[in-house]
Image (spheres, grey):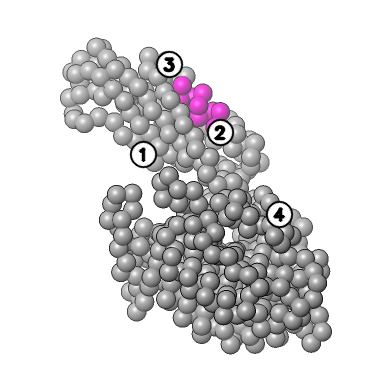
Amino acid sequence: MNAPDGPGFDTEIAALADEVEPRVLAWRRDFHQHPELGNREFRTSKIVADHLKSLGFDAVHEKVAHTGVVGILKGGRPGPVVALRADMDALPVAEEVDLPFKSTVKTEWSGMQCGVMHACGHDAHTAILMGVAEVLAEIRERIPGTVKFIFQPAEEGAPDDEGGGARMMIDAGCMENPKVGAIFGLHVTSNHHTGKLGYRSGPLMASSDELRVFVRGVQTHGAMPWRGIDPIVVGSQIVMGLQTIVSRSLELTKEPSVVTVGVFHGGVRDNIIPDEVKMEGTIRTFDEGQREAIHGHVKRISEMIAAAGGAKARVDIKRGYDVVVNDPALTAFAVPVLERVAGKDNVGVVDKVCGAEDFAFFQKVVPGFFLRVGCRPVDRDLRSAAPNHSPRFYVDEGCLKLGVRSLCALSLDWLARA
Ligand SMILES: [Zn+2]
Ligand SMILES: [Zn+2]
């Protein structure tokens, strides 16, 4: 074997992926049974770090951005640096899937007791990347460049008052020393069958911002509304007003977007009009300009409607994750590689996803490509498959090896061509 590029190298990767598959399955099951919430991935990250050290990595940095691990594998030949990223955190969800390695873990989250489950499949991502580490370590002498393995905590968000996730990893310098030239990551999804890979050039996943509106009225007896200002009626008008942003103000043909009010709190009993109403919601967009425009509309509509009713509205918008944008040139590079790995018929363009991913922040630093990996059993239709974050979310483990082969091929091919 000469250069680690092209179909010639694929055979070797496929064989090594076969070899490592039982261990990838075992890691995944172990993580699944022992899920940990964001910034609390102590056990998971220790297993990851020990594994990378056992493979003879050149460096293994631990406790990066709380519990993150960054491993550096230098190839035997000179070349650029490519990064591969996996997220390690689980969710406050009580598992309902009947598995021998079902999670029964319970913990406290925001002051409440809850179950913990890998309901987004990050157990699969971590196990896949550990498998990739083992395969690439095996052939390191022939790798023309360096592979950086980024195991990231808290993709689903850090506990209150703690930073975390991709942003914090970047601030901690994970994209420097050595400087990364491109980054690849993947996510399992029950939207697609096992064996399928989905991609999209440009915007793939939405930005996600948190919106809060406080409407201040004047408390009064429920039987005498004229003696006060009713924030519930004003708040209701604001909820309706917000519906006009996407339908009336945005250029719908450009990108989709969503404004949802998910919380509406006000009042304590039937015969009291309260002083204040609090609303919370989420804003999803695929375009920075539209994101800014929506923020402006939310503020203006809330404040003006409140003023019209004699009330006052205060709007807080907390910027969350940016849009996951797959670099078009990198996507054009990646598609034929994936077609080689999975078969041409198994690789296709997927619809945009209104969920968010902090992989977006890595893509702000260097060109990045985020891949969707089908994990729905082939005999199950979409309607009967629970989505990510459901207590019934199920990962068909047949997808793991394909994940390993995809990341191996993407990184090796990118290094060979760079
Ligand atoms: Zn998730
Ligand atoms: Zn996820």
Residue linked to disc 4 = 366
Answer whether residue 289 is magenta in the image. Answer: no
Circle 2 crowding by C-alpha within 10 Å: few under 14, some 14–19, many from 20? many
The residue shown at (46%, 28%) is 315
Looking at the image, is mark 4 or mark 2 earlier in the sequence? 2
| Place of residue 41 in the rendered image (x, y in percent of width and height, measured from the top left) | 44, 63
Instruction: Give me the C-alpha separation between circle 1 and circle 2.
Output: 19 Å
Q: Is residue 356 above or below residue 106?
A: above
Looking at the image, is mark 3 or mark 4 earlier in the sequence? 3
Judged from the image, the secondary structure of the residue bearing numbered disc 1 is strand
Judged from the image, the secondary structure of the residue bearing numbered disc 3 is helix
Judged from the image, the secondary structure of the residue bearing numbered disc 2 is helix
Residue linked to disc 3 = 307
- First to last magenta residue range: 295-303
Frontmost residue, 373 versus 113: 113
| Place of residue 17 in the rendered image (x, y in percent of width and height, measured from the top left) | 61, 83
Residue linked to disc 2 = 294
The residue shown at (61%, 36%) is 290
Looking at the image, is mark 1 or mark 2 earlier in the sequence? 1
Task: Look at the magenta stretch and give its main secondary structure.
Answer: helix
